[in-house]
Amino acid sequence: MKVTHSNPVANGHSVEIGQASWDENAFSIRNRYKTANGGFSPRSSSEFPISDLVPLAKFAAQHDKLSISECMQIITALSESVLRQNK
């Protein structure tokens, strides 16, 4: 994965977006976890296509696996994205 954006979460955990490792024309997203020596742990840092986010989020929501707070955070971020894209 060729990272274009990175967002630290906490304690060596970050979320990254970039060019997919399997297709230079596709985008992917992953959790990234540092190892004890500061390296990158590929086992715990899964990468998947951006397009998988919608079915994953919908499935979790349909089974009430997201808290109200988590739902509100997602709704807020999506609303802000819609506003930016409509400019």
Image (cartoon, helix red, strand yellow):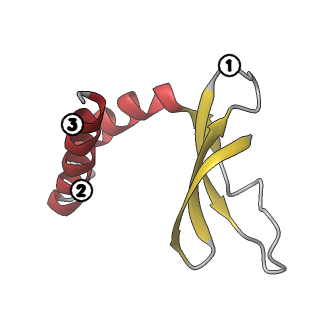
Look at label 1 and name its amino acid. Asn
Q: Are marks 1 and 3 in contact (CB under 8 Å)?
A: no
Given contact means CB atoms under 8 Å apart, are the residues at marks 2 and 1 in contact? Answer: no
Question: Which label lies toward us, 2 or 1?
Answer: 1
Label 2 belongs to which residue? 73
Residue at image mark 3: 83
Point out the image quarter for the C terminus.
top left
Marks 2 and 1, how far apart in space?
Answer: 29 Å
Callout 3: few (<14), some (14-19), or many (20+) C-alpha neighbours within 10 Å?
few
Q: Residue at x 47, y 25 (%)?
A: 51
Looking at the image, is mark 1 or mark 3 nearer the viewer?
3
- Give x and y (percent) for residue 3: 68, 46
Label 3 residue SS: helix
Q: In terms of sequence position, does the residue under pointer 1 or pointer 3 come before the other?
A: 1
Where disc 1 sits, the SS reads loop
Question: Residue placed at 29% from the left, 33% from the top?
Answer: 58
The label on residue 25 is 1
Occupied quadrant, residue 19 = top right
Q: Residue furthest front?
A: 87
Q: How many labels sit on residues?
A: 3
**Label 2 residue SS:** helix
Q: Could you tell me the amino acid type at mark 3?
A: Leu
Task: Quadrant for residue 8, please give it.
Answer: bottom right
